[in-house]
Image: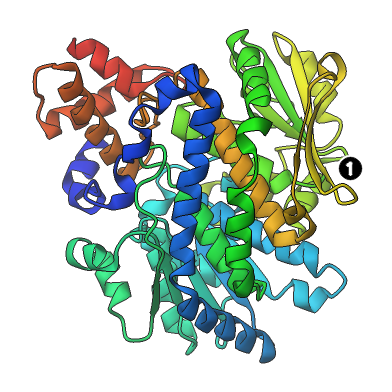
């Protein structure tokens, strides 16, 4: 997106009034707490998780309606489509993969759920700039994947305003008589009164809105945390017909000793990054959860994204994924998605999001050794697995790090949906704490956010206004800040902080 285009359309991305974009009162000093009292920082985020998930319980009657709509769709032999963008797109693909894994012995049943996200399957491993800003992309993508009469769409957007996701809703209305669902995490009235595109969907007589009012995130604007968690819990419970077990999951999660389990792991990984060394996550059980969390670190904290197979760079991603049970790229993607990857083969994209481009990312077993050979410093391996006999989630170091072993005991790992959701939440807290140790946010403000689309540009400007006031610097107009964002982003490296550079220039 160019400066002139953003300024012309800035009103569409002005979202600072939405609660999911706000600052959580309980984490105002999160970055300090991570350094001074890591267990307390972890407990604080775990409590915020619990509170956000309680918003799901309040919507049990609507979730029962959604579950009935899903069951009716399956009964008539049609498919359920889950659309999302960014974190909600990845949770759509995670729910699809979990569904397919659970019903692997029944091919027709397994194929009855299809996830899609802005940027396609490619965006699961690397964020696709600007794709989410166009509703027509959502419509076109949904139709490409075969959506037709009798199919059900569940459109999932954390904020309730993402153009791509809204585009899938309008597409579903054109092609199927079945009422699409629109799932979001900001109060209905605020969206209705302030965001035109949201109001058009929420007030549409053939759309069923579902509000999960989670409030602000533990890290401001980082909706991959509590918002995506609440939505995965809600939509997943409806899809797997486990609505009656939602409170059981919340209660079991809230009692887990996560603050005893994670600190050693957080310190281990943080120390590796401080030495400018690398981490390789290895798992055959949780590849989509690990890939989701590690991919989402890139735009949130301006980290170098994953490299493709055989790609040589001056800088490499801090971490990577390897699936020991996969022998090559295609096998690794099959284990991630429980199907072959699907590319977006539109001519104007020149193959950038194609299936062939997706398969250039290899997460098979051989990548561990191949990557270690080309990295300038040491790579440290960490396995993530679970044992059903002991009901334990286990993180275990490899090689020189073999003395690192941390275990979390929970019967939640016995249930396919709860298992994946639990690991997502544990990884979210872990990476949030690690990034705090690496000073990638201040208080609860994302000072290293990468302004790669309209929403993130607006967010960057708002954070600058907040930090300028906090530091007592001279006031700068919003338009001047926007111009600075575009200028600075064009002259610094992708893994540098736009916000911090602008603050440095101003001071």
Residue drawn 67% across and 72% down?
240
From this view, report whether residue 233 is shown above or below residue 361.
below
Question: Toward the viewer: 38 or 222?
Answer: 38
- Residue at horizontal 68 percent and vertical 25 percent from the top: 265
The residue under the point 74% across, 49% down is 410
Residue 93 seen from this side: no
Note whether 132 is above or below 56 in the view shown.
Answer: above
Q: Considering depth in this image, is 129 or 215 the residue closer to the camera?
A: 215
Q: Position of residue 384 (x, y in %)?
A: 78, 37
> Which quadrant of the rendered structure holds the C terminus?
top left
- Quadrant that contains the N terminus: top left
Image location of residue 22, percent across then percent down: 29, 44
Q: Quick one: SS at disc 1? A: loop
| Front in this rendered view, residue 44 or 137 | 44
Residue 483 visible (yes or no): yes
Write down the quadrant of residue 363 in the picture: top right
Which residue corresponds to mark 1? 325
């Amino acid at each position: 997106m160019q400066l002139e285009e953003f300024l012309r359309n800035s009103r569409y991305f002005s979202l600072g009034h939405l609660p999911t974009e706000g600052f959580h009162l309980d984490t105002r000093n999160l970055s300090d707490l991570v350094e001074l009292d890591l267990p307390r920082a972890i407990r604080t985020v775990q409590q915020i998780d619990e509170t956000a998930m309680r918003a799901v319980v309040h919507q049990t009657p609507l979730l029962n309606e959604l579950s009935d709509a899903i069951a009716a769709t399956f009964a008539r032999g049609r498919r359920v489509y889950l659309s999302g963008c960014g974190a909600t797109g990845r949770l759509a693909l995670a729910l699809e993969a979990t569904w397919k894994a659970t019903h692997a012995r029944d091919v027709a049943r397994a194929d009855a759920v299809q996830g899609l996200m802005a940027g396609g399957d490619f965006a699961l491993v690397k964020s696709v700039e600007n794709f989410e800003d166009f509703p027509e992309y959502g419509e076109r993508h949904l139709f490409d994947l075969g959506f037709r009469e009798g199919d059900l769409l569940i459109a999932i957007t954390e904020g309730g305003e993402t153009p791509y996701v809204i585009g899938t809703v309008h597409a579903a209305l054109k092609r199927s008589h079945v009422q699409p669902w629109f799932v979001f995490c900001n109060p209905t009235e605020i969206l209705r009164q302030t965001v035109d595109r949201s109001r058009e969907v929420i007030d549409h007589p053939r759309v069923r809105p579902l509000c999960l009012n989670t409030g602000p995130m533990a890290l401001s604007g980082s909706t991959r945390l509590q918002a995506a968690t609440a939505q995965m819990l809600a939509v997943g419970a409806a899809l797997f017909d486990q609505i009656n077990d939602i409170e059981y999951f919340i209660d079991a999660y809230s009692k887990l000793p996560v603050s005893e389990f994670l600190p050693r792991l957080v310190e281990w990984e943080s120390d590796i990054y401080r030495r400018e060394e690398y981490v390789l996550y290895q798992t055959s059980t949780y590849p989509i959860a690990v890939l989701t969390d590690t991919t989402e670190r890139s735009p949130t904290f301006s980290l170098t994204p994953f490299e493709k197979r055989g790609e040589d760079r001056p800088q490499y991603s801090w971490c990577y994924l390897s699936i020991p049970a996969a022998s090559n790229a295609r096998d690794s993607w099959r284990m991630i998605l429980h199907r072959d990857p699907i590319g977006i083969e539109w001519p104007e994209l020149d193959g950038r999001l194609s299936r062939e481009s997706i398969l250039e990312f290899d997460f098979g077993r051989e990548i561990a050794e191949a990557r270690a050979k080309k990295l300038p410093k040491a790579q440290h391996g960490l396995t993530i697995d679970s044992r059903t006999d002991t009901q334990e989630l286990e993180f275990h170091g490899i090689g020189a790090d073999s003395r690192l072993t941390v275990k979390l005991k929970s019967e939640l790992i016995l249930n396919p949906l709860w298992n994946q959701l639990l690991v997502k939440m544990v990884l979210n807290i872990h990476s949030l704490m690690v990034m705090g140790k690496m000073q990638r946010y201040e208080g609860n403000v994302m000072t290293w956010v990468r302004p790669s689309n309209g929403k993130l540009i607006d967010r960057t400007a708002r954070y600058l206004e907040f930090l300028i006031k906090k530091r007592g610097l001279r006031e700068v107009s919003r338009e001047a800040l926007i111009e600075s964002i575009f200028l600075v982003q064009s002259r610094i490296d992708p893994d540098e902080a736009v916000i911090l550079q602008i603050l440095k220039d101003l001071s």
